[in-house]
Image (cartoon, rainbow, N blue to C red):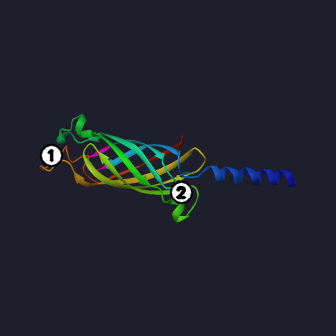
């Protein structure tokens, strides 16, 4: 009986150690989820690669599917691609090994912006995430059309996160 309890305890402890939200250099995360914002709902996907103990870079892309017809939004208005830099501070906050908070900056096709996100891993390979993004400075200084405003506003994304 003692061997069974010891084995079970060892298994639970070791699985908790491998379920870290951000492991540092070489860590790879893939996230896919829903993108919510004014006048549109779509899909979002991102990939982050760890460069150091608390730094990662990556790419993020979104495409808006549910856009009101009155906006006359074409593909280039609905699509956005971002290069991103994250400061992974979950281990600094020391809340839980499975939790990561990552504020960051992004350079998109539409603007220069920021984001703040959080992810929590239930197992070594699967977790959930929530992230907000917002523009800081847009590239187009002319007044934007309603369709051009689609990817130049506050957005909320949430979904599944995977360790690769």
* Residue 53 to residue 161: above or below: below
Q: Which residue has dot 2 on it?
A: 99
Asked whether 38 falls inside the magenta stretch, the response is: yes
User: In which image quadrant can residue 97 be found?
Assistant: bottom right
Q: Label 2's element?
A: strand
Q: Is residue 43 left or right of residue 30?
A: left
Q: x, y percentage for residue 8?
A: 77, 51
Q: Earlier in the sequence, mark 1 or mark 2?
A: 2
Q: CA distance from mark 1 to mark 2?
A: 39 Å
Residue drawn at point x = 39 percent, y = 45 percent: 34
| Residue at the far left in the pictured view | 142
Crowdedness of circle 1 by 10 Å Cα count: few (<14), some, many (20+)?
few
Residue drawn at point x = 52 percent, y = 63 percent: 92
| Residue at the far top in the pictured view | 75
Query: Dividing the image into 4 quarters, which one contains the C terminus?
Result: top right
Q: Which residues are magenta?
A: 37-41
Residue drawn at point x = 45 percent, y = 50 percent: 56
Q: Which secondary structure class fits the magenta region best?
A: strand
The mark lying in front, picked from 1 and 2, is: 2
Q: x, y percentage for residue 106?
A: 33, 50
* Residue 63 to residue 95: above or below: above
Q: Nearer the viewer, residue 163 or 91?
A: 91
Crowdedness of circle 2 by 10 Å Cα count: few (<14), some, many (20+)?
many
User: In which image quadrant can residue 136 be found?
Assistant: bottom left
Tell me if label 1 and label 2 are in contact, CB under 8 Å: no
* Residue 151 to residue 101: above or below: above
Q: Nearer the viewer, residue 95 or 105?
A: 105
Q: Which residue has dot 1 on it?
A: 145
């Amino acid at each position: 009986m003692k061997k069974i309890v010891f084995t079970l305890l060892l298994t639970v402890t070791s699985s908790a150690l491998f379920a870290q939200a951000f492991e540092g250099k070489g860590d790879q995360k893939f996230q896919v989820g829903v993108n919510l914002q004014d006048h549109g709902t779509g899909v979002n996907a991102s990939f982050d690669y760890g460069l150091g103990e608390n730094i990662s870079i990556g790419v993020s892309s979104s495409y808006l599917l549910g856009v009101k017809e009155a906006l006359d939004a074409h593909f280039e208005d609905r699509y956005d691609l971002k290069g991103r830099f994250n400061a992974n501070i979950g281990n600094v906050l020391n809340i839980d090994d499975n939790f990561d908070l990552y504020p960051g900056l992004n350079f998109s096709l539409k603007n220069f912006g920021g984001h703040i996100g959080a992810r929590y891993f239930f197992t070594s390979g699967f977790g959930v995430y929530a992230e907000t993004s917002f523009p800081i400075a847009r590239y187009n200084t002319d007044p934007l059309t309603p369709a051009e405003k689609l990817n130049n506003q506050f957005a909320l994304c949430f979904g599944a996160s995977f360790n690769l």
